[in-house]
Image (spheres, rainbow, N blue to C red):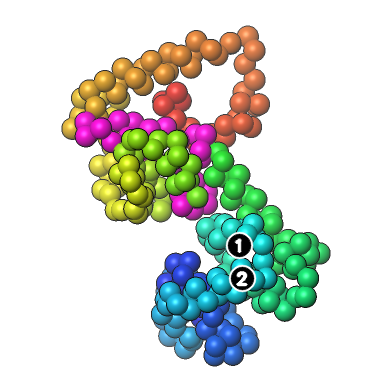
Amino acid sequence: MTPVFYDGSYDGLLTAIFEIYEYKIVDFNIMPPHQQANSLFTQGHVVETNKEKAQRVFTKLEQVCSPAAIQNIFAVYLSELPDMENGLMRFVSKALKSTTPYEHNYSDPDALMLKQVSRKVYKERHRMEAFVRFKRTKDDIYYAIIEPTYNVLPLLLNHFKNRYADQSWLIYDAQRRYAAFYNQQEVAFVEVEHARLLASYHSNTGNDEVHEELEALFQNSWKTYFKSVNIAARKNTKLHIQHMPKRYWKYLVEKQ
């Protein structure tokens, strides 16, 4: 089996798919960076990300897949699940050979994988859209911290651009340690100081060097409202956790 090493990017994965065809690699194992440390002395094919090759694969996919299926391919990539690269490679290979829309062939394990995994990723995106809590800085920038199971930050951008188009905001993925920053015109992925941002977010004084002075008041008002609408006699913890799993509570103001 030939290891195919790529840089972990989506363009890199599409380039790997292109070169598997280009170099006629039959027995392949596409490997992201975190798996390559165990293969330092293994000979394989090293992929250099090439946007032109990636675009050619994307254009070909547009000819054999629906727009929804292409979005699902990207969602599976964002899942970061083990071996997802090889599953996507098999899906693409079968889709290119099929004379009918292969994406609906749920009797095939790779088509079924695409549907099931992408559904989980979209569910995580939906929850993030509901559970993101912003705090305001002295520079009038709103920032939030998330730790999603899947790498859904790229899927959140349009939602928050549309919802907060007239505000500057930053959403930081603390697990993957990268952020998306919106300056009221465009979104860019940026690096931030991890420890400082987390310490500031969990500060409730509202008087540190990051927070806007009224932030503590806003947070306390929200907590008071949350408590006031909570009817103790009708409390259903099991149902509450079902709709708002505990893994999201870490960055919810009302749960602090």
Q: Which of the pair 35/170 is nearer the observer?
A: 170
Q: Which of the pair 123/207 is nearer the observer?
A: 123
Residue 136 lies within the magenta run: yes
Q: Give the residue number, with chain letter if any, for mark 2.
A: 61
Left or right, residue 152 beside residue 237 = left
Q: Is residue 1 visible?
A: no
Q: Mark 2 belongs to which amino acid?
A: Leu
Query: Could you say where residue 218 lies in the image, as x and y percent from the top left?
Result: 34, 19
Work out how far the residue at label 2 is from the one at label 1, CA to CA, in angstroms. 7 Å
Residue 219 placement: quadrant = top left
Q: Give the residue number, with chain letter if any, for mark 1.
A: 70
Please report the residue visible at 48 percent of the width from the left and 86 percent of the height from the top: 45
Left or right, residue 213 beside residue 129 = left
The image shows residue 132, relative to residue 40, as above or below, that is above
Left or right, residue 207 beside residue 255 = left
Q: Which residues are magenta?
A: 128-154
